[in-house]
Amino acid sequence: MRLNGLILLVSLLVVALAAGCGKKGGGTADGDPKDNSKGALADGSNDRWSSMVLIGLDKDKTGSVVIEAIYEGAATPAAIDMGSHQDCAALHGDTVIYQEAEQVNADKTVPWTFVHVTKGLKGTYGTPNKSRRMDQKGCVYVPHVMGVMAGQPVFVYNSDKTGHNINAMASENIPFNKSQAAGAAPLALKFDAVEMNVRLACNVHSWMNARVHVMKHPYFTTTGVDGSGKIPFLPPGKYTLSFWHETWKAADVEVEVKTGAETKITVKLTK
């Protein structure tokens, strides 16, 4: 009887510890997730609207929001010095590469602004069966800012002829630090917990960084190189949009979406 009681106690402790460890999610993906991220766009618009997400949603009865982000102040993006890594510098020749934190186009539009719906949504959403793709190309992360849904596989590629490492500094998800040699297979990652602003770094090349925002719904976008992004398939109604930028900020914006219509907004980023 004592032995059986001891076995039961140990079993309960193991279960409790497993449940406690489960409070955080992420790290390398379990099993063998399918890499179907080929052709993914920087804003993810073609790789999160899977059939799993759209169950019960009539796309013909939805609308969309198109966002343009602008910054009218003085911006001074810093040039990246790759001199200590000639293998990286050689990839760009005489072209100057700038840090993404303060990039502004000539027309004042701003890339890498993350936009997501924070109020107005109803219901829950399934995890997309389409994976996301993050690349290391020219010794920079591409894209610089990316949104994913919790549990959605992310495949990190190394398109360079030099080694990198992916150092994810997460708080709600499990942090990880994985090396990736030139020519290595894509690294499969997964973030199970909702978390804004997971920072990715490369300990080999100090200037490399990216941001991943983990969402519980698919209604988000990142402004591309032209400073614009689109959130499609929103049911008619009123919504609140929130914005994240690495350097600047913006107040929330309320929008009304109508069936078959495209609502356009311009958001001004400030210091």
Image: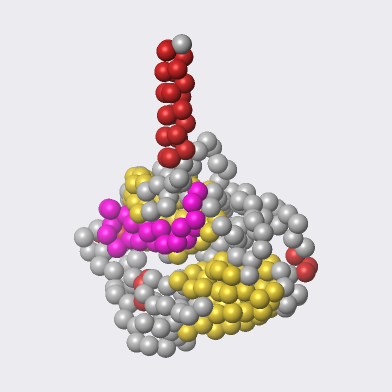
* Residue 115 vertical position relative to residue 13 in the rendered view, above or below: below
Looking at the image, residue 111 sits to the left or right of residue 82; the answer is right
Residue segment shown in magenta: 192-214
Which residue is at 43% across, 23% downward?
9
In the image, is 153 to the left or to the right of 86?
Answer: right
Which residue is pictured at 55% across the width and 80% down the height?
253
Please state which of residues 100 and 197 is positioned toward the viewer in this rendering.
Answer: 197
Where residue 54 sits in the image (x, y, percent)?
70, 57
Above/below status of 189 relative to 264 = above
**Residue most extreme to the front:** 1
Q: Quadrant of residue 50?
A: bottom right
User: Of 40 and 4, which appears nearest the observer?
Assistant: 4
Residue at image point 36% right, 75% down: 247
Q: Quadrant of residue 117?
A: bottom right
Confirm whether the magenta stretch covers residue 202: yes
Say whether residue 259 is visible: yes
Q: Is residue 191 above or below residue 254?
A: above
**Residue 187 visible in the current orientation:** no
The chosen color scheme is: secondary structure
Horizontally, residue 247 falls left or right of residue 212, namely left
Which of the pair 63/255 is nearer the observer?
Answer: 255
Locate residue 28, reporting x and y percent: 44, 42
152 w.r.t. 17: above or below: below
Measured as percent of width and height from the top left, residue 134 is found at 47, 55
Quarter of the picture holding the C terminus: bottom left
> Residue 113 colored magenta?
no
The percent position of residue 263, horizontal first and vertical second, equals 66, 80
Residue drawn at the location 22% of the way across and 64% of the way down: 83
* Number of numbered markers: 0
